[in-house]
Image (spheres, rainbow, N blue to C red):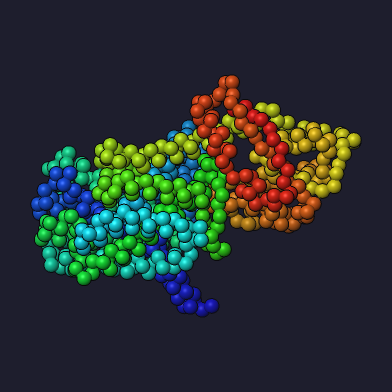
Amino acid sequence: MEPAATEKTDIKRLGALSLAAMGVVYGDIGTSPLYTLKECFDPDHGVPLTPENIYGIASLVFWAIIVVVTLKYVLFVMRADNRGEGGILALLALAMRATNADRARIGPLVVLGLIGAALFFGDGVITPAISVLSAVEGLEVGTPMFQPYVIPITLAVLIGLFAIQSHGTELVGKLFGPVMVVWFVTIAVLGFIEVAGHPGILTAINPAYGLTFLFTHGWIAFIVLGSVVLAVTGGEALYADMGHFGKLPIQISWFVMVLPALMLSYLGQAALLLDNPEAVKNPFYLLAPDWALYPLVALATLATVIASQAVISGVFSLSRQAVQLGYSPRLDIRHTSDEEEGQIYIARANWGLLIGIVALVVGFKSSTNLAAAYGIAVTGTMATTTVLALVVARHQWKWPAWLCIALGVVFLVVDLAFFGANLLKVANGGWFPLAVGAAMFLAMSTWRRGRVILAKRLAEGAMPLEMFLQQQKQSEHMLRVRGTAIFMTGDTDTVPIALLHNLKHNKALHQRVVFMTVITDDIPRVSARDRVVVEGLAEGFYRITVRYGFFQEPDIPKVLRLCKAFGLEFDMMDTSFFLGRETVIPSVHPEMAEWRERLYVIMGRNAVSATDFFRIPAGRVVELGIQVQM
């Protein structure tokens, strides 16, 4: 291909990715104008609608977007890609690798990463609720007669959205980008018309207005920050979805379309409030002429569904990473596309999210009430992301300490100010996402700790593999039966308990015995050429080590086909898989609190079976049980 043609193809592909990113990545932050300014001037805050206050709050919103989204996420955090992937757990893995020499720092980093991931789940529950509800509330602007139908319509939209998740989002995904382009163009035009009529509002980009508001209003200004943060709540999605589109398309979409559209919308709403203070009841929808109201409600509902879809997909991806990195029991993860690896469906996460969202909509009843609960989870995640990214900058990129400290001061002052302002919302609903986050943190940390303790207990009574192989060499009377036995084991240096039990009861070994260990590396993907390592241990004994990234799911039959390149072939009809099934019983001297032991047992019982998780043919599996004291 000619260089010019290649360049043209690359530009075309970059444009397509940028368009797609506009739909998936920016759905959440792109719909924030629906409610942000309205909540900033909530009567409960006690902020008079004076020109000085309007300019001050508009300036705060402007600079929040510049500092948090543009400088921090788009230009700084997105540099911290884990082999092209982003997200809080991917960043945690990167930070742990960067500080691997200093083991004392690993523990606090893990705690920080788990807190950020847990809070993301809390954000995942509240984002679809407030986004769709705020869009449907536009019907009330047209006529109060729609008021009784807002909640039912919102629930119908949300239930429909979650009901189609199992069918995949490939078809709907093709519409995401174009719909969001129409959305951003629409809000930009509506904002521009108002700004053109009041061009003086452009001076609100002067940070002096925002600083003056903060210093002259004291405690009230601090409370208002809890609403200003609504303008940047979708920032975490930029990083989490980086692996789907790449860094450059996301940055292009931001600077070319999303940032200008958001700024025009916010400044336009501020200009409208200067001219008509009564518009504070819903400044976004009142920007539109009367004839455009209902089409705008329909478009906003579509846009908020897209925003919700982005969060749902993020929760699915985070759940998969948690399983692969050992922070969650095995889940039933189903691919909904043969072409896109990132399109997955997790039934438990899907219906769990829907139950929480329905409870929120029914319980809080309006976007204003939900806004009281929104922000605390995402600001907590933002702060943890800042710390982990700074660790990577210092230890992996070798940035000078003074630069990291300077960035840390700027970003953390903003993050913690927003987080502190949102802590004031705890009594008014902020407890809900915190409760969800606390539950998820407890579950992930308990599972991780339980697996460590269980591995230690199993190792205590295990036989060293070297000793076992030596015994087999010296034994001339061991009966060897036809076929291949594959023993799944997590410890490459000891004999699987399933093998010892099989030997104890059947008094025989297969002609070919394979010890297979599946390892999940702290990188997103392991290439097929690095997937398998085969070692010959002794006559008839082999070790197979299989590696995956945390964005990949194991497929053992496919792995066995790869072994042919190492001279080891498998006939599935002549191969048996031996799996150990541990039954955990309480310990006399527990290393975890008794209630956490019980939680671990319950989580283990509800885990997907190893047979299904590793995609092993069920008819070729033999499970051998063992009781283990925690």
Q: Nearer the viewer, residue 563 or 185?
A: 185
Q: Can I make out residue 595 in this image? A: yes
Q: Is residue 629 left or right of residue 340?
A: right
Q: Is residue 199 left or right of residue 616?
A: left
Quarter that holds the C terminus: top right
Residue 372 drawn at (x, y percent): 27, 44
The image quarter in which residue 310 lies: bottom left
Name the residue at the right extreme.
477
Give above or below for 464 relative to 203.
above
Give above or below for 237 relative to 6.
above
Q: Is residue 552 left or right of residue 466?
A: left
Residue 21 drawn at (x, y percent): 40, 63
Q: Nearer the viewer, residue 553 or 160?
A: 160
Number of numbered discs? 0
Q: Residue at x 29, y 38 (%)?
A: 426
Q: Residue at x 56, y 55 (%)?
A: 334
Q: Nearer the viewer, residue 587 or 21?
A: 587
The image quarter in which residue 189 lies: bottom left
Q: Can I make out residue 18 in this image? A: no
The image quarter in which residue 337 lies: bottom right
Q: Residue at x 27, y 40 (%)?
A: 428
Quarter that holds the N terminus: bottom right
Q: Residue at x 57, y 44 (%)?
A: 330
Name the residue at the top extreme.
588
Residue 468 drawn at (x, y percent): 78, 34
Residue 35 drawn at (x, y percent): 25, 54
